[in-house]
Image (tube, rainbow, N blue to C red):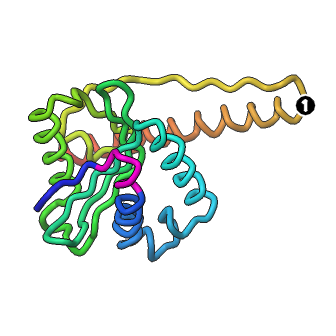
Amino acid sequence: MRLVCATAVEELPQAFADFLAVEDSGWKGERGTSIKKQPKKLAFYHYLLNEYGARSICQINILYLGELPIAAQFGVRVGRRLFLLKIGYREDYAAVSPGYLVLYKLAEQSAARGDIDSVSFVTGVSWIDRWHPRHLDVGIFYLGNGSWLSGLVVMVLVRAIKVRDSLRRRQRVATVADNDD
C-alpha cells in the first residue's frame, strides 16, 4: 500500500480522476449519487480543483494497493489544517477498511513531514467517532434580501433545519437506547 498526497498542479488531474473512480465505484455510482454521475456537482468539484489547485491549497489523497486506488479523499488545506470535503473507498475492499487506512496513513505521513497538524472532517457523520475527534459546533444563519420570496426561502430553510436536527436527536436517542439493551 502507498499513499499519494497530490498537491502540485501537475499531479492533481490524475489524482482527481482516481478520486472520482473510487467515489463512483460502489453504491454511490450504482444509485447515481456519486460526483461523477451528477453534472452540477462534478462541475463544482472541477471548479474547486482548478481554483484551489492554482492556489496550492487543494489536496487529493489516494491510497493505492499496488496500482489500484482503493480509497480517496478530496480536501482543502488552510494553514496546517486539512479540511476533507469528500471521501470514498472501493466497497469491494471494505473488509480491510480502506477509509480508515487512508486516514491512518495520512496521519502517519503528516506527522513525519510535520505539514498538517489537524484534519477536519467538515461533516459530523457517526463513523468518524472512532477517531475521537474534537467536535466544534458551527452555526449557520440565513438572511433574506428583503423580498417576500427570500423571506419565504429563509423560513423554509430554518424549518427544514429544525426538522433535520429533531430527527437526528431522535436517532441518537434510539441508538443509545439500543446500545443499552
Q: In the image, is 80 to the left or to the right of 46?
A: left
Magenta range is 6-12
Please identify the quadrant where the N terminus is shown: bottom left
In the image, residue 86 lies at what x, y percent?
A: 40, 50
Q: Is residue 36 left or right of residue 119?
A: right
- Magenta span dominant secondary structure: loop
Which residue in the structure is indicated by mark 1? 148
The location of residue 170, given as percent across then percent down, is 42, 40
- Asked whether 119 or 11 is in front, the reply is 11
Image mark count? 1
Work out whether residue 36 or residue 3 is closer to the camera in this orientation and state it. Answer: 3
Q: Residue furthest right?
A: 148
Q: Residue furthest front?
A: 10
Q: Residues within 10 Å of mark 1 (few under 14, many from 20)?
A: few
User: Does residue 7 belong to the magenta stretch?
Assistant: yes
Residue that appears at 41% across and 23% down: 137
Q: Secondary structure at mark 1?
A: helix
Instruction: Please determine whether, in this image, residue 153 is positioned above or below residue 93.
Output: above
Q: Position of residue 61 (x, y in %)?
A: 28, 51
- What residue is shown at x 33% (from left), y 59% (from top)? 88
Q: In the depicted view, which residue is nearer to us: 171 or 118?
A: 118
Q: Is residue 64 magenta?
A: no
Quadrant for residue 21, please give it: bottom left
